[in-house]
Image (cartoon, rainbow, N blue to C red):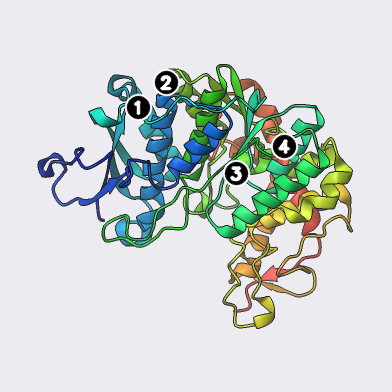
Amino acid sequence: MTHHTIYCRLGETNLPAADRFGPGTVLSDIDFIDASGKLKFGLAPVLQQLDRMGLRPTEIALDLVILATALTAADTRINRSAHSQDKWTREIDVFVPVSDVALWRRHHDLIGRMLRFLTGDHWRIFFEDRPSEHTELTWRSGHLFTVPATSVCLFSGGLDSFIGAVDLLSRGEQPLFVSHRWDTLTSNRQRDCVARLSARFPEYVIGNHLSARIGFDHSTVTRSSAEDTLRGRSFLFFALAALAASAIGDGVTIHVPENGLISLNVPLDPLRLGALSTRTTHPYYMARFNELLHGLGIGARLDNPYRHLTKGQMVERCLDREFLRAHAANTMSCSRPAKYRRHRDKSMRKIQHCGHCVPCLIRRASLLHGFGESGDETPYTISDINGRVLNSAKAEGEHVRAFQLALARLAADPARARRHIHVPGPLCDHPDDLAAYETVYVDGMREVGRLLEGVQARSRY
């Protein structure tokens, strides 16, 4: 076990004192201000994009994004396997300069609970005053307000977010879309999807898209290699949306388009609860994030309008099904689209949907449900999962077999659905929605079950 401390500062005068940190911790001192006085790590371009739209966010909302960026440094650059006793749970302290220390310290415990639930790690967050030369990091825009947006919508470039965008635009709404990209592939997909939406909805202004690229090189955190589980990614995604919302005004809805099966993310087996089960849009986590926004005085609220729908039902009920069918293949759902880029079989070295991970299987099932046998034109590395026996001891069959076993247990004991929807996290914020959550879980599993009829996956050894 290696304890890590991430110390975020704003400029050379905001230096840490060595005696402030616990003994034995590995200290990473990260300056968020570059030589020209601008924010680093992709934050300045975000503010510049908002400025070009005539939008100025609040300093509190920018505090939230700086906190989220610091958490991203820790989450993506502290390797779980190398720096934890159980190969998963890390111990991390983060020091963050903010514009209102008293306000932020009132929410210290809430943030700790949120992060523990989201990432499975032990976090301690410490808030400090910004240095005097950086008390204001936003600026009043000299541009005209050009964005008639009244809401914000997260836009990942995945199928769910594409459906969310189509539905909003089909209703005549003009949200400000917020994207975050980790890599070139994601960026290209997002731009391509936005271009297709703009062509279909000419009244939609292409400038209504905030695209952020926030990240860190491999030397940012001391004595650690990269980590690819990325359990904290939605904290940054939600914070960026809140930043945009704060610039628009009060009472802003942040749309989070995510199907109910993935949002609940009931583990397929007990071993998947920690390492293989994400909670990025779980109802409990989203409720806590809304609690934080309210406590900070940020007049915005996260809402998942599809929380009671399966992915297939989202496809089926999309307000422009013809457009969706024509362009669904251009969205990206795969958890690791580049996983085959070094495969020994050169014909499989493609960056595309793998076709067999959990998100790919749910995607395939949804398009089968919504459009029938010929409705999915997505290129998959393993396109015909019925064509051979999949090896469940390898990636190609691991999740297929896990779904099959979970479906068999559900068929043998249908009442387990009522119990198991509570396994990933509490649903205490939505006591009147329990029946709906149970239904979406069962319906979502059955969608995947229809996809897997006749598919064989077993260990060959």
Q: Amino acid at mark 3?
A: Asn
Mark 3 or mark 4, whichever is nearer to me:
4
Mark 2 vs mark 4, CA separation in Å: 27 Å
Percent x, y of residue 429: 55, 23
- Contact between marks 4 and 1 (CB within 8 A): the answer is no
Q: Residue at x 80, y 51 (%)?
A: 327
Mark 1 vs mark 3, CA separation in Å: 40 Å
Mark 2 vs mark 3, CA separation in Å: 29 Å
Percent x, y of residue 167: 78, 34
Mark 2 residue element: helix
Q: N-terminal of the two: label 4 or label 1?
A: 1
Identify the disc placed on residue 164. Answer: 4
Q: Amino acid at mark 4?
A: Gly
Q: Residue at x 22, y 50 (%)?
A: 27
Percent x, y of residue 278: 53, 46
The residue indicated by pointer 1 is 136
Asked if residue 311 lies left or right of residue 133, the reply is: right
- Contact between marks 1 and 2 (CB within 8 A): the answer is no
Mark 1 vs mark 2, CA separation in Å: 17 Å
Residue 159 visible in the shown view: no
Q: N-terminal of the two: label 2 or label 4?
A: 4
The residue indicated by pointer 2 is 296
Mark 4 or mark 1, whichever is nearer to me:
1
Which quadrant is the C terminus positioned in?
A: bottom right
Q: N-terminal of the two: label 1 or label 2?
A: 1
